[in-house]
């Protein structure tokens, strides 16, 4: 029969020493440690307030955990000193894990908020991390942690020649989550640095940041699992099953993921481009690993799988230049003064705020397209910035031209047909 693990309850020890004079000395050490921590934070305040161009989040994180961390260091030093005179330092022994847990909670919440976007799931992660840290602290001070540790170690199962315990799986999950979060944090730091390099193309910066994130996640997994004693060769069967899954069920996901990297590297579609794909028109606002986000002029956002941008024809209205050419066609009667109509149409174009007038290669022009059945077809061609769409510009120009034609008496003819009546033949 296994020998039961004794319970080392720090709270019980503290209550036992409540009448001991040494408790006052320990309270003094805590008070001095708190004052030293406050002084250290006051001295470091100008450093925290100074902007850091390399990693501003680093100073923000130090400011968040600075006080409990400084007090923890002071308590450790104070405990090492008073142990020469006091036989028991139970209050300081209780303060050390308490301050360490506070540092862990503040650091975990800050890292999660730095890595992930503010969503509802982020609050769940934060609460989970806080409950886990404070739960371990409560089990430690009550002396129950060694017993729970032994119980989880006893619950195990065999897989081939390898033995897995509940404790080992729990440690693997915790280490894996921590490693992934650290990898994502490093990826965010590198991404911020890359985005600050304005001399590099934006698509190339996005491709590099996503590549770095992928590599860091793989490295985190490869480091985390062996760190808790799990041999990576055990995952060979799982890797084979995953490969079959990608070949069948996850084929589209893998294709979209690879297509995202191809788009970023060949720069055929870039962030800020105005494109048309699958009858969807809009500005590219995001290029993610699985999809590309289009922001339409009417405010709608379209999620386009990256594979579609590779497999289908994409009209990039701003691939070589950000300007878009807009053409408006209308008919005028045959007896119209065409030079007057041309001048009125150009005046309407020049007065619109979004029409580009200083482009020497594509100035506003009026073209005579054809002599149609009902009238003469004129076309007004102008260049605009296509990021805000074309519908509003077309409507404004049509209204302006119609008002000017109405004031000048220029007719926009209805469809006309000339009918010749043939007289009946006489007998």
Image: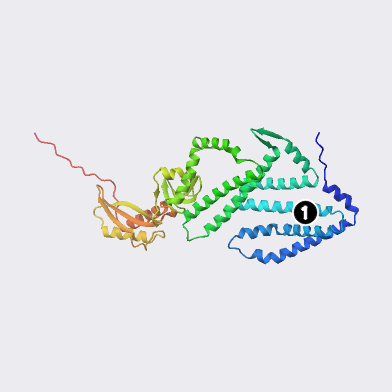
Give the camera-side residue of 376 and 144: 144
Total numbered labels: 1
The residue indicated by pointer 1 is: 96
Q: Farthest residue to the front: give it.
A: 161
**How many C-alpha atoms fall within 10 Å of the one at disc 1: few (<14), some, or many (≥20)?**
some
Disc 1 is placed on an element classified as helix
Q: Residue at x 81, y 52 (%)?
A: 93
Viewport quadrant of the C terminus: top left
Whether residue 404 is visible, yes or no, is yes
Q: Seen in the image, is 69 located left or right of residue 183?
A: right
Residue 341 in the image, given as x and y percentages of width and height: 29, 58
Q: Residue at x 44, y 43 (%)?
A: 308
Q: Position of residue 395 (x, y in %)?
A: 39, 52
Measured as percent of width and height from the top left, residue 385 is found at 41, 57
Answer whether residue 117 is visible to the viewer in this image: no
The residue that appears at 85% across and 47% down in the rendered structure is 12
Q: Which quadrant does the N terminus fall into?
A: top right
């Amino acid at each position: 029969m296994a020998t039961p693990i004794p319970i080392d309850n720090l709270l019980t020890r503290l209550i036992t020493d409540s009448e001991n004079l040494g408790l006052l000395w320990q309270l003094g050490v805590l008070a001095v440690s708190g004052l030293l921590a406050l002084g250290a934070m006051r001295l470091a305040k100008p450093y925290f307030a100074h902007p850091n161009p390399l990693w501003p989040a680093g100073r923000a994180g130090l400011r968040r955990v600075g006080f409990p961390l400084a007090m923890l260091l002071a308590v450790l030093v104070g405990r090492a000193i008073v142990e020469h005179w006091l036989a028991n330092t139970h209050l300081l022994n209780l303060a050390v894990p308490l301050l360490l847990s506070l540092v862990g909670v503040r650091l975990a919440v800050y890292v999660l908020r730095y890595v992930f976007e503010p969503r509802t799931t982020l609050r769940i992660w934060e609460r989970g991390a806080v409950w886990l840290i404070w739960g371990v602290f409560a089990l430690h001070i009550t002396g129950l942690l060694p017993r729970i540790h032994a119980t989880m170690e006893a619950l195990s199962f065999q897989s081939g020649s390898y033995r897995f315990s509940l404790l080992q799986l729990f440690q693997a999950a915790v280490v894996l989550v921590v490693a992934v979060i650290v990898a994502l944090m490093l990826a965010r730091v590198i991404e911020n640095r890359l985005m600050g390099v304005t001399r590099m193309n934006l698509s190339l910066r996005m491709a590099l940041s996503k590549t770095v994130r992928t590599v860091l996640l793989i490295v985190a997994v490869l480091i985390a699992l062996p760190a808790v004693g799990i041999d990576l060769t055990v995952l060979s069967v799982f890797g084979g099953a995953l490969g079959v899954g990608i070949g069948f069920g996850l084929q589209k996901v893998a294709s979209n993921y690879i297509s995202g990297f191809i788009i970023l590297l060949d720069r055929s579609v870039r962030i800020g481009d105005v494109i048309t794909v699958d009858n969807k028109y809009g500005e590219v606002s995001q290029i993610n690993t699985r999809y590309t986000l289009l922001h339409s002029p009417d405010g709608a956002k379209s999620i386009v799988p990256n594979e579609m941008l590779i497999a289908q024809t994409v009209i990039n209205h701003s691939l070589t230049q950000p300007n878009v050419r807009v053409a408006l066609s209308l008919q005028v009667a045959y007896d119209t003064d065409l030079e007057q109509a041309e001048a009125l149409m150009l005046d309407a174009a020049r007065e619109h705020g979004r029409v580009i007038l200083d482009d020497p290669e594509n100035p506003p022009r009026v073209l005579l397209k054809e002599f149609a059945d009902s009238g003469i077809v004129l076309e007004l061609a102008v260049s605009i910035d296509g990021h805000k769409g074309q519908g509003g510009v077309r409507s404004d120009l049509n209204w302006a031209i119609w008002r000017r034609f109405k004031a000048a008496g220029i007719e926009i003819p209805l469809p006309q047909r000339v009918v010749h009546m043939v007289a009946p033949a006489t007998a």
